[in-house]
Image (cartoon, grey):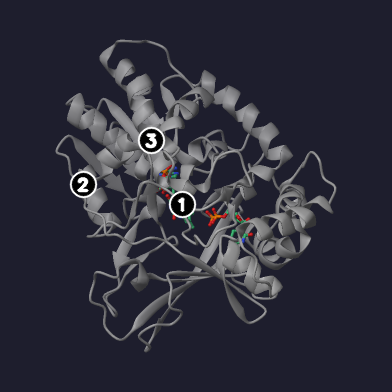
Amino acid sequence: MAIFGNDHRLVIVGAGFCGATIAYKVASELDLPVLVLDRRGHVGGNSYSKFDDETGIEYHQYGSHLFHTSNEAVWKFITQFSSFNNYRHRVFSRRHGKTYTIPINLMTINQFFGTDFDPAGARAFIAQQAAAENIEAPRNFEEKAVSQIGRPLYEAFIKGYTAKQWATDPAALPAEIISRLPVRFGFNDFYFGDLYEGLPTAGYSAIFDKILGHPKIKVVTGCDYFDVRGTIDPQVLSVYTGPLDRYFDYKFGELGWRTLDFEIERLDVEDFQGAAVVNYADIDVPFTRIHEFKHLHPERRHGNKTLIMREYSRFARRADEPYYPIGRQDDKRRYSQYKKLAEAEANVIFAGRLGTYRYLDMHQAIGAALNLYEKKVAPLLTGRCVKSDGPESDDLQRQSSPSLVPAKNAGVDEVTELRPRARSDR
Ligand code: FAD
Ligand code: UDP
């Protein structure tokens, strides 16, 4: 029984940025009807936000979501639906009762070591500490971090936070994770270094309402794809942005995901912590960070109350929302098994953070979706190509990368990356 009718030409599972972007492109450029399903009671995926009834403050239900990109195509796409404020993200880290700036920069180094280095002095000092570790070819997160910043900074700001955030010994984590965080030898303490950064002035949900409000798009929320799969014509093309392992009923076992628990508190104080995000580096503090959302919108008038959200991280079980792919060795092995199955699946394209088991930020999810539309979805729907394909390939991912790297904007001060590309290309 076709409970959603038969007129749609594409079914999209998941109303996050990936699914919404593809739906909009198909509806607006190909003028074809699209059905979007989401098991949650709202659209927007993890980027969903809402305005709190009591305080009037907009909060991001799944943790602070900072929009930043150097990809012109992504910026052009998203700014069709919203203007952005000029917020630039700064993060602080609490450790042993003191507050430092993160990512590690010249101020953090001088404050932590009680020194007054200039950039060259700090660089030489940290290089000496890193060299003492004697690691030539780092094999995991911990080795990579200490080989770049030395042990004292690693133990102070990275080790405890990471063990809490990933619920995994940092020595068992892939080195790529730490590569997301730069270390700088100047005073630049902006978290990102992209050409464009800001928060949508009317909120993320207003963006999704506009994108998915296209007349050719039908959205059904509170609907789990696996409950209705049998009613969907298998000849109709689908884009699946849910968890890859769930799609195949965990045939090869579960991929490692991290889930989060959020605890909201409304306080009768105007400003609780003075910044949108403060990380807690000490292992004996159970949460990883506190979000205070009013700071994301300095252009808005907020009252004298505030809303904060503590974030706790733990290993995901099947019933939990999977948020972060962990990517240990056995996960990588399982992923390649699932990828083979996905490639053989007729009429289904696997996409997005969950469907490709990748750590994608919003701009990367949108960038990959725009690529996927051009390279696979549109050709399949218009008959320009008959190939049915599996998960979004590495090739597609790479094609979206060059434009994600900012021209030279990361070089406001000296940046030594803990990874091949700067944080700004996240
Ligand atoms: P999602 O947004 O996860 O959407 C997938 C959707 O699929 C979900 O709504 C889910 O309910 C639905 N779904 C899954 N299974 C089914 C099913 N069986 N049936 C129906 N629907 C299903 N990015 C940034 O750029 N900046 C940030 O600051 C940032 N901070 C983040 C903080 C946290 C805590 C997290 C978890 C992520 C953060 N991200 C950030 C990443 C951002 O959330 C992702 O890039 C983005 O959500 C990816 O979009 P997506 O469409 O791939 O996936
Ligand atoms: N990280 C850390 N201390 C911090 C901030 C980050 O150890 O104060 C590590 C942590 O392992 C994290 C990684 O750096 O997963 C990348 O940081 P990012 O802010 O990108 O992580 P996210 O919040 O997106 O998980």
Depicted 347 relative to depicted 198: above or below: above
Q: Can residue 113 be seen?
A: yes
Percent from the top left, x then y, of residue 306? 36, 80
**Badge 1: how crowded within 10 Å, few (<14), some, or many (20+)?**
few
Front residue of this view, candidates 196 and 239: 196
Answer with mark 3 or mark 1, whichever residue precedes in sequence. Answer: 3
In this figure, which residue is indicated by the disc labeled 1? Answer: 412
Taking the spot 77% from the left edge, 51% from the top edge, the residue there is: 171
Disc 2 to disc 3, C-alpha distance: 16 Å
Q: Are marks 3 and 1 in contact (CB under 8 Å)?
A: no
- Whereabouts is ligand 2, in terms of quadrant? bottom right
Percent from the top left, x then y, of residue 163? 69, 61
Disc 1 to disc 2, C-alpha distance: 30 Å
Where disc 3 sits, the SS reads helix
Q: Amino acid at mark 1?
A: Val
Q: Is mark 3 within 8 Å of ligand 1?
A: no
**Badge 3: how crowded within 10 Å, few (<14), some, or many (20+)?**
many
Taking the spot 17% from the left edge, 34% from the top edge, the residue there is: 216
**Left/right of residue 291 with respect to residue 340 in the rendered view:** left
Taking the spot 59% from the left edge, 57% from the top edge, the residue there is: 185
Answer with mark 2 or mark 3, whichever residue precedes in sequence. Answer: 2
Answer with mark 1 or mark 2, whichever residue precedes in sequence. Answer: 2
In this figure, which residue is indicated by the disc labeled 2? Answer: 81
Q: How many marks?
A: 3
Where disc 2 sits, the SS reads loop
Give the number of the mark in front: 1 or 2: 1
Front residue of this view, candidates 418 and 131: 131
Query: Residue 46, labelled with which disc?
Result: none
